[in-house]
Amino acid sequence: MVFGGAEATAVPPVLDAPGCYPNCDLSVWMRSCDKEQLEPLHGTVTGTIPSWIRGSLLRNGPGRLNVGDDEFKHLFDASALLHRFHISNGTVTYQNRFLKSRTYERNTAARRIVVSEFGTLAAVPDPCQTIFQRVCSMFSTDEMMTDNAMISIYPYGDELYALTETPYLFRIDPETLETKRRVNLMKHAQIVNHSAHPHVCPDGTVYNLGQSVGLTGPTYCIVKFPPRDETGPESCFERAELVASVGARWSLHPSYMHSFSVTERYFVLIEQPLTVSTVEICKTLLQQQPLVSALRWFDEPTRFIVIDRNTNTATNIAYQTSPLFFLHTINAYEEDCHLIVDLCAYKDAEMLDCMYVEALKSAQANPHYADMFRGRPTRFVLPLEPGEGDADLVTLRGTAASARRLPGGTVQLTPELLCDLGSETPRIHYDRVNGKKYRFFYAISSDVDGDNPGKLIKVDTVTHQALTWCEEDVYPCEPIFVPTPDAVDEDDGVLLSALLWARGRDRQVALLVLDARTMQELGRAQFTADAPVPKCLHGWFKEDRLTDAT
């Protein structure tokens, strides 16, 4: 694993060579948009786009891998590019625009990379800063830390924000994609970072996982952002409230957490052994080193922290499993005195190495690349009232997951496999089943050595069977579930996914609409953009109000 400041091993690029993975074209991740698509393009529709779908599929992700002659070294470093597919009356338009973060503006003004990112070292100081400004910036995380919010989009109140894992988020205009406002959560919630995947409640309350550092060391914090109060002018950020906190297991080494889970009664944090050294992160900020140099892997068990939402304190039961790495939880829920937690798990954090640009370029010559990226959807079952003795503590019917007590009282968890397919960016019927018992989730394939790596996947968590959709040389993005207006069953609805084409068709993009029940295509709208369209990461569907529909 390339942590602690090491460089990824450079291998001569072998783009488009048959190599180890002849069915996979990883160059779809290495595109750079050199011209924004500011005016909406009208797509060519084949099949049928259901007329009841009225709204915008908004997407976020890496948009540009270079600034002038400088190149970013990791996919997570690329300048954030926002995408919009607007659907109305069976027609679709497409547009994109760069997020105008301070990092983007400073890099663009200097025509080089002047802010260090996750895996990229800023080669030179910002020439637009005076010597005095550079000295002052060494004492301000607001100046030293990247605010390139290129991971996700979530609603806070009635506004949409682009997020990353640093404490900055940006309000965006859902129609024009213009950047409207920058929010620094350190000024509102006293946290130094937050996850890129908050949870949005039906009443508009947002919960997110953050970290703070105090005299007793680093702590994990649950922050509540209330819905807008019609009686006052304060925003949800100004009324942010820290509702729970738990100390980190390793002194000065909090765990890296990209997402977390919430159920009706619990918050669930997964303390994996990939950690962030607080000493090293201070050094990276002061010395403008890449943030990856502060990551440390401990070959120790992964811990599940269960926080009671009624008392806002962690339960007194210690749960652990073998070391693993994850980015995305799928869902969690309670059933018969058990807590079920589903996530996309990897054996370790080597998959982060797979997203270095050089690793992507040389993947076809690396027979280990597929194994490094090998993740699987996994279920853990936590007994909430575990008994004593050596017997399996899981009494829930219909699961192969187990749990046993270790000497000292810790509960050791053994998971079950939900499906033997690589699954990433998982989504569910969120408004209906988030934090509740559910049956289906949807994802994209993460198996680069598959017969067709560009798969969309529907997994039945009861039968462990999967339905898939794929098309040769087509690469779909995270599928977003949109329910039908009169939905009865959990999978009554459609999946919306952005499509990209491989093998040189880098300006082609489409919106795909699948029947979520059958995974059969209903229709698509295809576009030819003015510039290459890069692959995106996460997004949100914003339904049109009747007064908004056009």
Image: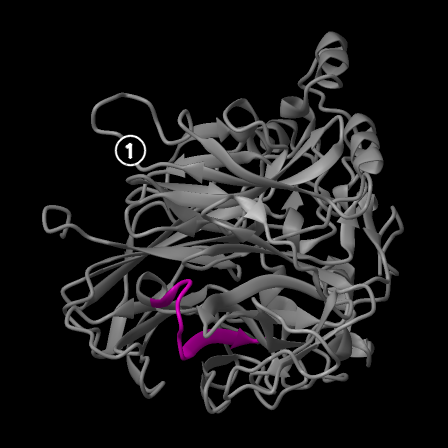
Task: Kindly indicate the quadrant of the structure image that contains residue 136.
Answer: top right
Label count reads 1
Q: Residue at x 14, y 69 (%)?
A: 51
- How are the colours assigned in the image? one colour
Give the image location of residue 175, x and y in percent. Answer: 28, 44
Image: magenta residue range = 433-445
**In front: 351, or 120?**
351
Q: Position of residue 422 (x, y in %)?
A: 61, 79
Q: In this view, does 540 lie to the left or right of 492?
A: right
* Relative horizontal placement of residue 442, taking residue 52 as reference (left or right): right
Residue closest to the eye, 481 or 247: 247
Taking 260 as reference, is 17 above or below it? Answer: below
Position of 429 relative to 305 (above/below)? below
Q: Is residue 98 visible?
A: no
Query: Foreground: 39 or 348?
Result: 348
When asked about the image quadrant of residue 219, the answer is top right
Asked whether residue 436 is drawn in magenta, I would say: yes
- Please provide percent x and percent y for residue 487: 20, 74
In the picture, the quarter occupied by the N terminus is: bottom right
19 or 286, nearer to the observer: 286
Can residue 277 be seen by looking at this rendering?
yes
Secondary structure at numbered mark 1? loop
- The residue labelled by disc 1 is 228
Q: Decide if residue 445 is on the left or right side of residue 296.
A: left
Q: Which amino acid does label 1 sit on?
A: Arg
Mark 1 Cα-neighbour bin, 10 Å: few <14, some 14–19, many ≥20: some
- The outermost residue toward the front is 388
Which residue shows up at 44% across the image and 75% down it?
441
249 within the magenta span: no
Q: At which x and y percent is residue 246?
A: 65, 43
Q: Residue furthest top?
A: 132
